[in-house]
């Protein structure tokens, strides 16, 4: 019944999809290729209904759906900076560039166009505010790793609302020199800094411009993975809700809001399938917040959902013509979270962890042996890693782009991939198509296969930006 209601509503509002968009939501799932989306829906079907098929996410039911190419100006496989620049400016550039061209000159972004058109503007993410994708909407720098310099561009853009985990280099310049803290600079530019959702609610009423980050002491690089979340952690849905609240207060001329689900990419770099699917679902929860706003303003709102690139080359099926995605429900934490707990186990046992201790631990954390049968080969792989790490104390941490994992956690993750029958091509990006979904005013502009550079151009057209 719920799906039928959604379908009928989509048909009814599609009639109004040709008007100008006063309110624009631009969701970017970093690393979210077609199979990340399809896999999440197939996992939901197995988990919720015990059946083969798909249980749709909200955004995949939008009436317009297509796909986009992602190559950069210099590489067949893009990085997030060049892809973010393409999605922000409609121009190709070199890998690592933040909204500058190959000549290093700044390129105007769709967010800057929206601001010039009199709209309020928000740039938000589940990773750091100075990371590649959000940075591409407000900053202009030749290298994505210029975090301090990117942060200095934030008040220059003069957007109304920023949000994310925090800032990576608040007092250190790109050339590794001490520099004045960015936070007084933000405050001098008229920004109120809120640390956490409750602090936002306390300060938002009197703030002219807002930066929402996590509470003091939290990891500034990102929000916690959805699978690891604890009560009180800031979420992407709360950030989206706060952005809408802030951008619609006072004189309402409309807004442009970019929301990035940044940790889909991080989990894909780690080849951590359970965490990936939970991150995709978490972004869908943020999109639901936007959709509730959309239902109140269907003739004036556009929601576009896409990705900057695919990460990991995820494969749904490893040759057996079947999947076992429901096994993923027994993984209680991300590979990073599991790694942390293994380190804690070492300390608790005084580095005298037994194989039986490890079996009990993995049974609780991953469902191995208790809920999920383990083959002889899989148990041997786990036991061999245990012998190396805990008996011989040869601990070589497994590294992906954004994390280092206890080797035992990395091995357990590989075993879970085998059980779920999910494969990975690499720990990096691929050139695969990314999906594009749209609903609302101007959504008809997204009807055929396109390049990623077309997306911001069509958003600007839908919003009437010059």
Image (cartoon, helix red, strand yellow):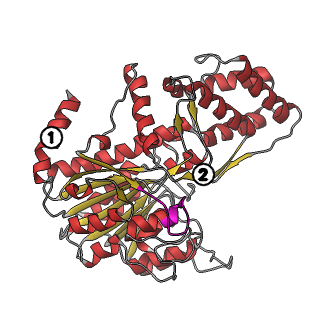
Where residue 192 sits: x, y (%)?
39, 70
Where residue 252 sits: x, y (%)?
18, 68
Question: Could you tell me which secondary element the residue under label 1 belongs to?
Answer: helix
The image quadrant of residue 202 is bottom left
- Left/right of residue 282 with respect to residue 376 in the rendered view: left
User: In this view, which residue lies farthest toward the right?
Assistant: 392
Q: Residue at coordinates 28% horizontally, 72% vertically from top-left?
A: 114
Whether residue 72 appears in magenta in the rendering, the answer is yes
Where residue 87 sits: x, y (%)?
40, 64
When the figure is inspected, residue 148 is found, relative to residue 194, above or below; the finding is: below
- The residue beneath circle 1 is 9
Please give the range of residues in magenta: 69-82
Look at the image and tell me whether residue 226 can be seen: yes
Specify which label sits upstream in the sequence, 2 or 1. Answer: 1
Where residue 209 sits: x, y (%)?
34, 71
Magenta stretch secondary structure, dominant? loop
């Amino acid at each position: 019944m719920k799906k039928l209601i959604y379908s009928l509503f989509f048909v009814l509002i599609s009639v109004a999809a040709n008007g100008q968009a006063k309110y624009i939501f631009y969701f970017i799932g970093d690393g979210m290729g077609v199979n990340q989306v399809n896999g999440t829906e197939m996992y939901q079907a197995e988990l919720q209904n015990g059946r083969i098929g798909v249980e749709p996410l909200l955004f995949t039911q939008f009436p317009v759906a297509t796909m986009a190419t992602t190559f950069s100006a210099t590489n067949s496989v893009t990085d997030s900076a060049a892809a973010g620049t393409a999605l922000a400016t409609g121009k190709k550039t070199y890998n690592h560039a933040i909204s500058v061209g190959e000549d290093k000159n700044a390129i105007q972004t769709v967010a800057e166009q929206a601001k010039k058109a009199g709209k309020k503007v928000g740039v938000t993410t589940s990773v750091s505010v100075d990371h590649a994708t959000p940075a591409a909407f407000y900053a202009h720098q030749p290298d994505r790793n210029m975090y301090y310099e990117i942060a200095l561009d934030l008040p220059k853009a003069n957007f109304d609302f920023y949000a994310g985990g925090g800032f990576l280099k608040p007092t250190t310049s790109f050339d590794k020199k001490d520099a004045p803290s960015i936070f007084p600079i933000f405050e001098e530019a008229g920004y109120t800094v809120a640390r956490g959702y409750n602090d936002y609610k306390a300060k938002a009423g009197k703030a002219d411009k807002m930066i929402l980050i996590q509470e003091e002491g939290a990891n500034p690089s990102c929000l916690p993975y959805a699978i690891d979340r604890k009560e009180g952690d800031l979420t992407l849905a709360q950030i989206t809700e706060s952005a809408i609240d802030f951008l619609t207060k006072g004189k309402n001329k409309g807004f442009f809001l970019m929301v990035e689900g940044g940790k889909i990419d991080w989990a894909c770099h780690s080849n951590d399938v359970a965490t990936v699917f939970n991150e995709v679902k978490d972004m869908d929860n943020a999109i639901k917040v936007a959709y509730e706003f959309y239902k109140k303003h269907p003739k004036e709102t556009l929601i576009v959902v896409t990705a900057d690139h695919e990460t990991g080359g995820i494969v749904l099926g490893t040759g057996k013509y079947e999947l076992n995605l429901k096994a993923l429900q027994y993984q209680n934490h991300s590979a990073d979270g599991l790694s942390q707990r293994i380190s804690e186990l070492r300390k608790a046992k005084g580095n005298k962890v037994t194989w039986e201790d490890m079996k009990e631990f993995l049974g609780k954390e991953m469902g191995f042996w208790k809920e999920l049968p383990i083959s002889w080969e899989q148990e041997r792989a786990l036991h061999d890693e245990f012998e190396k790490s805990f008996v011989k104390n040869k601990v070589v941490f497994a590294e992906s782009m954004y994390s280092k994992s206890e080797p035992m956690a990395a091995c357990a993750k590989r075993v879970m991939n085998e059980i779920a029958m999910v494969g990975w091509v690499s720990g990096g990006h691929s050139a695969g198509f990314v999906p594009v979904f749209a609903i609302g005013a101007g959504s008809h502009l997204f009807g055929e296969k396109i390049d990623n550079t077309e997306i911001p151009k069509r958003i600007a057209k839908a919003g009437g930006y010059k």
